[in-house]
Image (spheres, rainbow, N blue to C red):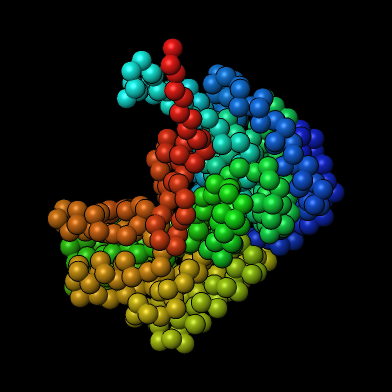
Amino acid sequence: MDTTQYRHLIAGRWEGEAGTQNINPSDTTDIVGMTPSATAEEIKAAISAADDAREQWAQATPQQRFEVLDRAGAEILARVAELGTLLAREEGKPIKEAIGEVTRAGQLFKFFAGECLRLSGEIIPSVRPGMTVEIVREPVGVVGVITPWNFPIAIPAWKIAPALAWGNTVVFKPAGNTPGCAWELANILTRAGLPAGVLNLVYGSGSQVGAAMTESGLVNAISFTGSVGVGNSVAKAAAEHGIRVQTEMGGKNPMVILDDADLELAVEVCINGAYFSTGQRCTASSRLIVTDGIHDEFVGALEKRMRTLTVGNALDPQTIIGPVVDQTQLDQDRHYIELAASEGGDVIGGEILERATTGFYLSPALVKSTTPDMTINREEVFGPVASVIRVADYEEALSVANDTAFGLSSGICSTSLKLASHFKRHAQAGMVMVNAPTAGVDYHVPFGGTKASSYGAREQGSYAKEFYSTTKTIYTNP
Ligand code: UN1
């Protein structure tokens, strides 16, 4: 298969010498592409280009912005199979899920294209005679977009599309593991007619690009998705420089299974939430909290279903669970699995597997008989690993579900309207799922969490304007 030479996109020009290999985690002999790493000058040039393009894009008409985003969405949707193959190849997401993610990216561009036409303000009578007050929304300015490898096209889409829709310019720093999707996206937006400098793409070290963004004096907002450690340091640096910031970080998402749950549905919900996308989702269900009466039957059925999950090459249509993204992540997954066993958990699966091609294959792991204080129930693994906590009743389930530093997504499987309704109100999370997996969200509604999971305004849907625009209040005395 092809090896693509990626380049930075700075002020409309493709630049940089390709240096690092982009390796296929399903087959480490397959080099997907070669990625450059930005020098300090290149990062500076990208930020300046975004600053230079600010005024032009801020003044573009809603129609001009709509057309660019709509065309980009159309191209993504027309190429879902091809882009899905690239995504599967560079990230290891099984092809069907990869195509699903690319489709979501196309839909996000279409949604935010529509948002360009829905920009509105308010006119309010002043408390002073004769005076009128207008409240209008304006772009924030230059937005730094820092994205992770686990959703290499959907997350860039849900940050870049609203940034552009509300008239901002962008400096985009994608994750090192997934440069290919970022490269395609930058090409698509360029072909869609985005003026030079409105989107700038730089590859390189996260800490170097992040520091350049916060210290440049030209970046007005940063949207970050990634680990808790990096997210918190980005937020801190942004605050020190008066930069608006939004961070989406980890999860330790609970899925509560009550005695009255539909067993078959609960098993499917947990299989999907815990293991799809190889568990590499901040929304993954990693703590399965199960009440006493259904515990044994549920765990037995889940184990049986786990054994049917085919682990293999992401490009093989039979694969349900792809490889882990790289060796570092595989080591982290194995570390947590071993730690869970040493702390008294009963581990099923979680073994390194060999396949026809050399890759980072790990069988899904279930850690039974755990207690809420074990490390496996406190820290995010970010792999195909879930644990089971047995509880007496709904009250205990709710309290265990909320007993975490995180608060992204929280789920319950129950046929009781009363208990599910109580859970919806009392789950400490930004998103609550009833009889549905904690992961896998719609593209047109707010996304984000509470506690250590998220900081700043929500992403996605119309609510994204709270981050990507700012209000101006205008008083007129005619
Ligand atoms: C989803 O569950 O559909 O990094 C999306 C993540 C999240 C996205 C999850 N920001 O896993």
* Residue 152 visible to an observer of this rendering: no
Answer with the quarter of the image where residue 263 lies: bottom left
Q: Residue at x 36, y 61 (%)?
A: 270
Q: Is residue 81 left or right of residue 341?
A: right
Total marks in image: 0
Q: Residue at x 68, y 66 (%)?
A: 358
Q: Nearer the viewer, residue 253 or 115?
A: 115
Q: Is residue 434 above or below residue 270?
A: above
From the top left corner, tell me how far across and down residue 465 is, in percent. 47, 36
Q: Nearer the viewer, residue 252 or 472?
A: 472
From the top left corner, tell me how far across and down residue 156 is, in percent. 58, 44
Q: Is residue 260 left or right of residue 97?
A: left
Q: Residue at x 46, y 56 (%)?
A: 454
Q: Is residue 270 above or below residue 291?
A: above
From the top left corner, tell me how far across and down residue 12 is, in percent. 76, 33
- Quadrant placement of the C terminus: top left
Q: Is residue 202 left or right of residue 83?
A: right
Q: Nearer the viewer, residue 66 or 289?
A: 66
From the top left corner, tell me how far across and down residue 354 is, in percent. 61, 71
Furthest toward the right, the residue is 17
* Residue 307 visible to an observer of this rendering: yes
Furthest toward the top, the residue is 478
Q: Residue at x 76, y 47 (%)?
A: 43
